[in-house]
Structures are given as C-alpha cells and as structure tokens.
Image (spheres, helix red, strand yellow):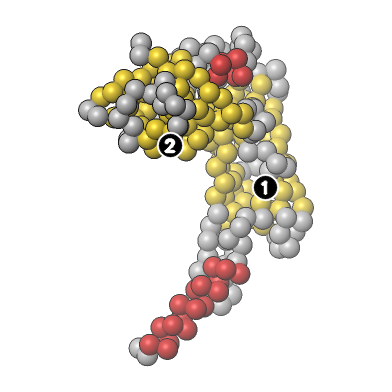
Amino acid sequence: MKLTTVFSKLAVVLITFLSSNVWADINFDGYTRFIFESSQKQLTFNVVNEGNEVALVQVTLDWGDKRSSAYMPMAVSRPLLKIPANGKASVDVLYQGTGLPDDQESFFRLSVLEVPKKPTEGNVAQIALQHNLKFFYRPKLPGNPQKAVEELHWTGAIVAGSMQLKAHNNSPYYLTLTEVRLLDRQGLACGAQAEHLMVAPYSTYNLNVPGCGKQATQIAYTFISDGGFGHPHITDVSTH
C-alpha cells in the first residue's frame, strides 16, 4: 500500500472524529445527579437533544456500588428513546416501594447511551457516547448532606513513607468529594491530589496520598451538593 494512501485513510478517520458529535448533543436540563426522595411516587427527568438530527438513546439503571446482585427494585419507564432534533423526551424512574434500606441512602448509576447511526460511507469511525450520572434514593433521614460533610472526621498517619488517610462518615448520606488535597503546617499542598472520591454511609474510606511523607494537619476538598454545585471545605486531620 502506498504511503499516500495510508495518510489519506488516516485523514478520513481524523476528519470524522473532528466533525462528528464528539461533544455530546445530549444533556439533562442541567442536572448531573438525581435525588429520588421517598415522598415521591416516581422521579421524572428529561433527556434533551440539542443536535440537528434525531437521536436514539438507551437508558439503564444499575447499582452504583457494583454489587453482584441482579435484583433491582427500581426501573426506568422508557429504556429506549427516539428524540427529535432540538427536542426532548421524559423518562420516569419507578420504585416498587420495598427492597431498599430506610435508614440510609442507596446509590445507583443512571446510564444514557447515544446509539450511533449506521454509517452511509466507508472508512467512517463512529463514537458511542455514554453518560453516567449519579442517582440516589433517599428515604426520610435525619440531618442533611451539608451537615454530614461538616461532621466528616479525618484521621491520618505516616505508613511506609507516605500519608495514609481515613475518612469516617457516620451519617446516612453518600458524600461526593473532588479536588481532595492535603495541606501541611504552612498551608501548602502536600502530595498528589485525588480528583474524585465518594464516602458511603456509615463507612470509612481509605485514601493513600503519594508524595506526602510528613504529617499533614489539614485537608481541603470540594463537596458536591444535591444540585451538583461545588462547595470548598477545609478541615483538620487528626492522628486518632
């Protein structure tokens, strides 16, 4: 095969990647997570197609903690949607009323897959885009997530030359944290930053911080609220 032919085919692939919908035309009316309150009979959300062509999407709901159980007490009303150009379609998430704990949140993963169209030309690379959103079922619980993150207790110790942290969550809420970084006594960042972590209800999350070989005194992070907004937070790290 001639070298010019190889470059021509590579160019077709690159042009396809650049001209196709690499940036998704699908969104969810600005939502990045959903909270299903126990007082609701169902939760309805919109899948919005901002593209100029009809979109075919597949909607699935799975356990967020990757449990092996196939039993799912929740279901989506419309697992396959055909959304007109510049239009929207609604999906209901239904709960049968039993099967989930009533003393803590339950975590699911809501996945929306954009099904690519069948190519009409050869040498066309297609990208199937999948959106994964956090979905929580919340029974009637004491307190709130904001109070829970304020009471999140951090302990740390030097183990094998690096800082080992433990986040103790004594609340019934899942706490999502981003941009997690340790601070030394001078307030400077120590070691690598953890981009994202989530602490489950009534659990302890273990976090290793490579590159920080001294006892840090504080930890800084951004707490993601129900609305998907980030709230900066700094708290002390104790040794016990």
Mark 1 secondary-structure assignment: strand
Identify the residue at the far left of this view: 160
- Residue at 54%, 50% (x, y): give it: 130
**Mark 1 nearby-residue class (10 Å; few <14, some 14–19, many ≥20):** some
- Do the residues bearing badges 1 and 2 touch, measured as CB atoms within 8 Å? no
Left or right of residue 86, residue 28 in this image: left
Left or right of residue 30, residue 130 in this image: left
Residue 171 in the image, given as x and y percentages of width and height? 52, 13
**Mark 2 nearby-residue class (10 Å; few <14, some 14–19, many ≥20):** some
Residue 155 in the image, given as x and y percentages of width and height? 39, 17
Residue 90 in the image, given as x and y percentages of width and height? 72, 41
Residue 50 in view, yes or no:
yes
- Residue at 61%, 57% (x, y): give it: 23
Residue 159 in the image, given as x and y percentages of width and height? 25, 24
| Position above or below: 70 against 106 | below
Query: Residue beneath label 2, please?
Result: 193
Which callout, 1 or 2, points to the residue nearer the camera? 2
Q: Quadrant of residue 17?
A: bottom right
Which mark is first along the chain, 2 or 1? 1
Q: Which disc is residue 27 wearing? A: 1
**Three-letter code for the amino acid on which mark 1 is drawn:** Asn
Identify the residue at the far front of this view: 186
| Position above or below: 119 against 1 | above
**Three-letter code for the amino acid on which mark 2 is drawn:** Gln
- Residue at 61%, 28% (x, y): give it: 231
- Residue at 60%, 19% (x, y): give it: 145
Report the number of discs: 2
Q: CA distance from mark 1 to mark 2?
A: 29 Å
Quarter of the figure that contains the C terminus: top left
Q: Nearer the viewer, residue 144 or 165?
A: 165
Identify the residue at the far right of this view: 87
Mark 2 secondary-structure assignment: strand
